[in-house]
Image (cartoon, rainbow, N blue to C red):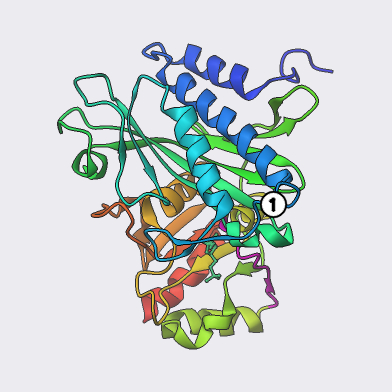
Amino acid sequence: MAWTDDNLTSLQTHVLAEEREHPSATGDFTWILSAVALAAKSIGNKVRKARIEDVIGALGDENVQGEQQQKLDVIANEIIKSCLGSRANIGALVSEEDETPTVLRTHEDGGRYAVLFDPLDGSSNLDVSVGVGTIFSIVRLSDEVKGTGEARILDPRSLQVAAGYVLYGSSTVFVLTTGRGVNMFVLDQSIGAFVLVKSNLRIPPAKKIYSINEAYVDRFPDAYRNYLNWAHDNGYSSRYIGSMVADIHRTLLKGGVFIYPPTGDHMEGKLRYLYEAMPMSMLIEQAGGRSISAADTRLLDVDPTTLHQRIPVVMGSTDEVEHVNRFLSES
Ligand code: P6P
């Protein structure tokens, strides 16, 4: 055992170590990430017992997206807000489940960050025990824009400084970037801590796997259909779980390309910019991959205009994204 770099590191000690490397660090980050980790443990516990506690299935209401809310969507949403609400440096919370931001503190009262999240992405898969997840983005709010509402969150000077997801699958996996590479942790239930299992995770530059819901192929723009025909002729495999966190986790670890294109009834795609595509794009890029929303258009260069806007997504291995980009550029 190399005692210098094979130590047992928890998410907490990892974030504290990173904080010590930032002379200007104030501990704000550590404070927020510890709240996210607490929420993840609590949600994971609920997901694992969902069928036993009879919280499977739809609530009967629709969320702001017009989608059937699952009972656990609401439970996960409340858990995250109850964990983050106590952090004194958070100005606002933006959730897929809430039409408007939860305003906690103004800029003057120290609200320096916003946390944007999809509390339980892919939750419609819960009743068949498919991996579901929490996706989050931490945004350092601009000091130029007062107030705390939508305008400050969407201001181009507000910057995404961290992103991550928690995958509630065969194990509970926490994947995080704070802008210095991607690190992967797994929840060790016996000690109740996320332990570091992979530092500086790198996505393979190429892998013949595409991940897309081909059921909608007739409604895709021609460029995407042309790409799929090319992939079929070049020995690609298709892997699609229908749960973004699970599909992105596989793409990050094994390589390939994840695509959610414009379709007939969703010309901006289905996935939301702020709390799905934006955090996942930061993770993919920090792992050495690429994320575009259109031909030669880096997804993270797109300035959001509304909290719940959707955006087309092509992200994954650099070579694989370029294969798609080539067809998009020809259209
Ligand atoms: P479709 C889940 O509802 C979700 O938001 C993502 O997790 C997933 O990638 C996508 O929608 C699946 O959408 O249209 O293929 O069922």
Looking at the rendering, which quadrant does residue 126 occupy?
bottom right
**Quarter of the picture for ligand 1?**
bottom right
Toward the viewer: 289 or 305? Answer: 305
Name the spot of residue 87 as percent of width and height, x first. 41, 22
Q: From the viewer's perspective, tell me whether residue 188 is left or right of residue 81.
A: right
Mark 1, Cα crowd under 10 Å, few <14 / some 14-19 / many 20+, is few
Q: Quadrant of the C terminus?
A: bottom left
Q: Which residue is mark 1?
A: 54
Which residue occupies the foreground of this view, 313 or 298? 313
Residue 183 visible somewhere in the drawing: no
Q: Position of residue 293 (x, y in %)?
A: 38, 63
Residue 237 on the magenta segment = yes
What are the residue bounds of the magenta stretch?
235-244
SS of the residue under disc 1: loop
Residue in the picture at 78% in, 13% down: 3
Q: Quadrant of the N terminus?
A: top right
Nearer to us in this view, 178 or 137: 137
Up-down relation of residue 243 to residue 135 (above or below): below
Relative image position of residue 152 (x, y in whole percent): 21, 38
Query: Which residue is found at the position 57% from the left and 63% from the top?
Result: 257
Does 1 lie within the magenta span?
no
How many marks the image carries: the answer is: 1
Q: Which three-letter amino acid code belongs to the residue tagged 1?
A: Asp
Q: Residue at 67% across / 54% down in the picture?
A: 250
